[in-house]
């Protein structure tokens, strides 16, 4: 029984609960691999070379670079729906064809549209036109506000 109490008293595992292992006793093995990059010290590309008394480099890039304007969204949407509603495709408009294809695809709802469905053509064309209208609207509004034209 005495031997069991002796083991219970000194049952700490070296390295888990104590700091009896020192760094000097463990040898570090340099691991190299073709998949790992060599250690590179990160550097700041905006830091100026020279004494710190020269000054700071400030970036003039505007934080609010998108400069969201709800007028652009509203006028862009109206500016695309109006011309895309002109009946120019065999007496139908692009908006009408797109919305009717949505209705046709919703009629068999749990099943999605087939790859050969006209829905995909009308969806891509309608959204491409909308995004072009919004992009050019943003360029026009902000270009006008900044005095480019």
Image (spheres, grey):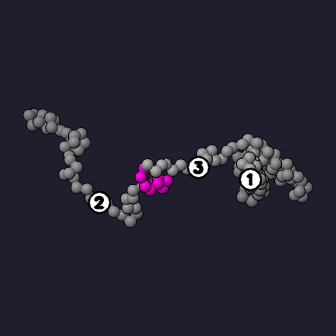
Tags 1 and 3 touching, CB below 8 Å: no
Residue 63, horizontal then vertical, whole percent: 60, 45
Taking the spot 22% from the left edge, 49% from the top edge, the residue there is 23
Secondary-structure class at tag 2: loop
Residue under label 3, please give it: 60
Q: What secondary structure is the magenta-colored segment mainly?
A: loop
Whether residue 32 is visible here, answered yes or no, is yes
Image position of 81 (left or right of 33)? right
Disc nearest the viewer among 2 and 3: 3
Instruction: Decide whether residue 98 is among the magenta residues.
Output: no
Sort mark 1 into few (<14), some (14-19) or many (20+) by Cα contacts within 10 Å: few
55 and 85: which one is in front? 55
How far is mark 2 from mark 3, CA to CA?
43 Å
Which span is picked out in magenta?
A: 44-52
Q: Which mark is residue 148?
A: 1
Which residue appears at 15% of the width and 35% of the height? 9
Judging depth in this view, the residue of 20 and 79 nearest the camera is 79
Q: Quadrant of residue 1?
A: top left
How far is the residue under mark 2 from the one under mark 1?
Answer: 59 Å
Give how far across and how far down residue 84 sits, in percent: 84, 52
Question: Relative to residue 48, is residue 99 drawn left or right?
Answer: right
Q: Is residue 133 above or below residue 33?
A: above
Disc on res. 30: 2
């Amino acid at each position: 029984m005495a031997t069991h109490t002796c083991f219970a008293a000194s049952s700490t595992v070296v390295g888990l609960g104590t700091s009896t292992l020192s760094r000097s006793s463990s040898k570090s093995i340099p691991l190299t691999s073709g998949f790992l990059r060599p250690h590179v010290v990160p550097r700041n590309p905006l830091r100026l070379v020279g004494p710190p008394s020269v000054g700071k480099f400030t970036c003039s890039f505007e934080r609010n670079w998108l400069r969201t304007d709800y007028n652009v969204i509203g006028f862009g949407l109206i500016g695309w729906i109006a011309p895309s509603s002109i009946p120019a495709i065999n007496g139908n408009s692009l908006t009408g064809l797109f919305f009717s294809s949505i209705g046709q695809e919703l009629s068999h709802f749990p099943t999605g549209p087939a790859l050969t469905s006209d829905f995909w053509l009308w969806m891509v064309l309608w959204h491409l036109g909308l995004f072009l209208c919004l992009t050019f609207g943003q360029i026009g509004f902000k270009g006008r506000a900044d005095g480019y034209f």
